[in-house]
Amino acid sequence: MHPPTAPGPAGEVSVTDYHTAGEPFRIVTAGQPEIEGRTVLERREFARTSAEVDAVRALLVQEPRGHADMYGGFVVPPDDDGADFGVLFWHKDGYSTACGHGTIALGAWAVSSGRVPAADDGDTEVVIDVPSGRVTARVHRAGGRVRRVAFRNVASYVVARNVPVPTSWGQVLADVSYGGALYASVEAAAVGLAVRPEHYPELIAFGREVKWALNDTEWARHPSDPRLDGIYGTILFDDLGRHAGGPHQRNVTVFADGEVDRSPCGSGTSARLALLADDGRLGPGGVLRHDSIVGTTFLGRVVARQTAESRPAVITEIEGMAYRTGTATFSLDPDDPLGTGFLLR
């Protein structure tokens, strides 16, 4: 619980809410405090240590205005004129380095709101600076409506294979890869689970164990920038074989401290693509069909190969869709004893 500190200069915060494949994304459009820094990554560090900024994050993510699985972002200036804007992604426990579903939502919002001009028909690129680098959302419109969004992520690569992880389910082997954030991948069947709603509590518990078992190890260190350190999430997946275009998998990503992505996880899909490409399971033109625990789908492709952090890497493109769910203006009554709210998991 936080003390009842009024957010923003006028005591109100306005947002536009989207969901991407079922996962919420709350875009702050007015009322956020000034967030200092020369780059988006510097602004992330400022936000993490600013009580004023973090009070607004808490207000928007915690109950009664949010919930333990809420997600959103502060729109900030880009690093330079090469991008349309920047964003700081946040969740119930703090600030992430990447967010694919948020990038898709921001692309749809930028075009639909007129922040980035777009024709009624065809593709428009929305360039966004995120803490892990620069990403580009390609927004396709037909008849003046957004129909799909695909984003090209920062370089993704394999960090480690078959890392032994002790858990209360026994030792498991995890693959660690990077897709703008560091993820540990474990097949759900390794501990007798499946990515289905009826296994939801067990998936959360297991995902948390894997994350925290690895978070202080060498596998959780970014090769060149400690500000990107940490295992962001555990990707638990079911291998469903192949579809006509390539591999078919279903996953649930348990990130932060037990937060669950309802979508197939955009940056996590990039991390999975790096592993599949390394396995030779995703050839030229191949498409990963990546389903979520709620039955929604992202399509993932490798569009280029290169070197990043002195290791083989891939440039990925993740396709999905985001839909606006509403707008709101939130405030905090100075007499409210709950302050910026609370969380129940």
Image: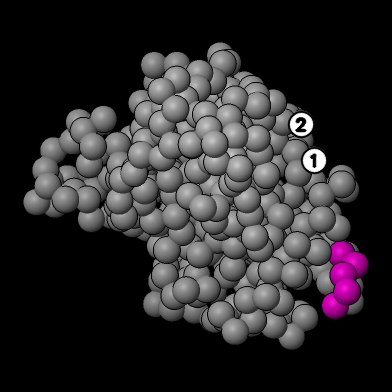
**326 or 41: nearer the eye?**
326
Which of the image's four quarters has the N terminus? Answer: top right
Circle 2 SS class: helix
At x 82% / y 49%, what residue is drawn?
215
**13 or 277: nearer the eye?**
13
User: What range of the chain is rendered magenta?
Assistant: 165-169
Which of the image's four quarters has the C terminus? Answer: bottom right
Residue 35 covered by magenta stretch: no
Q: Residues within 10 Å of mark 1 (few under 14, many from 20)?
A: some
Residue 152 is drawn in which quadrant?
top left
Q: Is residue 46 above or below residue 337?
A: above
Magenta: main secondary structure: loop
Q: Is 57 left, or right, of 319 in this rendering?
A: right
Say how the picture is coloured. one colour
At x 58% / y 30%, what residue is drawn?
5
Q: Is 119 left, or right, of 19 in this rendering?
A: left
At x 87% / y 70%, what residue is drawn?
167
Q: CA distance from mark 2 to mark 1?
A: 7 Å
Pointer 2: what residue? 226
Confirm or deny contact between disc 2 and disc 1 (CB under 8 A).
yes
Q: Is residue 278 above or below residue 303?
A: below
In this view, the residue farthest toward the front is 335
Is residue 86 at all visible to an observer of this figure? no
Pointer 1: what residue? 221
**16 or 344: nearer the eye?**
344
- Residue 124 spot, x, y in % from top left: 24, 38
Q: Residues within 10 Å of mark 2 (few under 14, many from 20)?
A: few
